[in-house]
Image (spheres, helix red, strand yellow):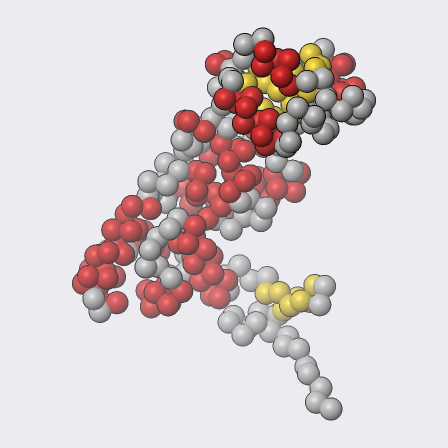
Amino acid sequence: MIEIVPPTSCPACASVLELVNDQLFCRNKLCPAQSAKRVEHFAKTLKIKGLGPSTIEKLGLSDYHDIYSLTQEEISSTLDSEKLGTKLFQEIQKSKSNDLTVLLPAFSIPLIGSSATQKLAKHISSIHEITPETCAEAGLGPKAASNLLDWLVNTFHFEKYYELPFSFACDNKAKVSHENTKGTVCISGKLISYPTKAAAKQVLEENGYAVKDNLTKDVTILVNESGIASAKTKKAETMGITIIINIKDILEEN
């Protein structure tokens, strides 16, 4: 019987591998294989057509900065095609218009995908407004918020990502202006009037209400259709928040 001996070093950078839950991991952030994968994910998320794994390898891209330092002539020369070079250069230039809701998921931050970013975009106008408070208001989980805040301090600033050619701003349409809403609603427990919370949220927002997952200080109405005295309900009572048992009650007032 042949004994299979697991590798002890990374084949890409020769760093010592770490065994976690029967899986081997390379912890070297400068590992070329990991760098290439991050660039690949970034290009895919920003929908930069023509910038796939083989092209990334040919162009020698190992960092996001590398993408935007390329000239049209360099791309055409490396790919040995003026047509491909022109097309890819145009795609790269076009990607600069992406806002923060697309950019954050592109940076490979654990637990920060499209869903988390869309939630966050309703409470901020730019990356500079990301704080523990705005993360909590957006309903991000503790781990997701911690990952994002750590990335801002240890990666965004350290790696000078702020020098990348983006505004790092959110589309103003995504942000909820509480001054222009009829109130801020939080839903507790199961619903009777609507099949899902997502359906109820859509109707509420269409009728001028902001909807939050967590009971924050700006919530004005708590919906508790189940009638169960949950922790949210008890907290709402102490905060003096209006508690209703049917969402349609507030919609009929409009």
Residue at position x 49%, y 32% in the image: 121
Q: Position of residue 174 (x, y in %)?
A: 45, 29
In the depicted structure, whether residue 110 falls above or below residue 54 = above
Q: Is residue 131 above or below residue 41?
A: above
Observer-nearest of 107 and 193: 193
- The location of residue 19, given as percent across then percent down, is 69, 67
Q: Which residue occupies the foreground of this view, 230 or 141?
A: 230
The residue under the point 65% across, 16% down is 221
- Residue located 59% across and 65% down the image: 26
Residue 61 lies, in percent from the top left, at 37, 61
In the image, residue 36 sits, relative to residue 161, either above or below, namely below
Q: Is residue 43 visible?
A: yes
> Which residue shows up at 58% across the image and 24% down it?
211
Furthest-right residue in view? 229
Q: Quadrant of the C terminus?
A: top right
Q: Quadrant of the N terminus?
A: bottom right
The answer, for residue 128, to whether it is visible in the render is no
Residue placed most toward the observer, 127 or 186: 186
* x, y percent for residue 69: 30, 53
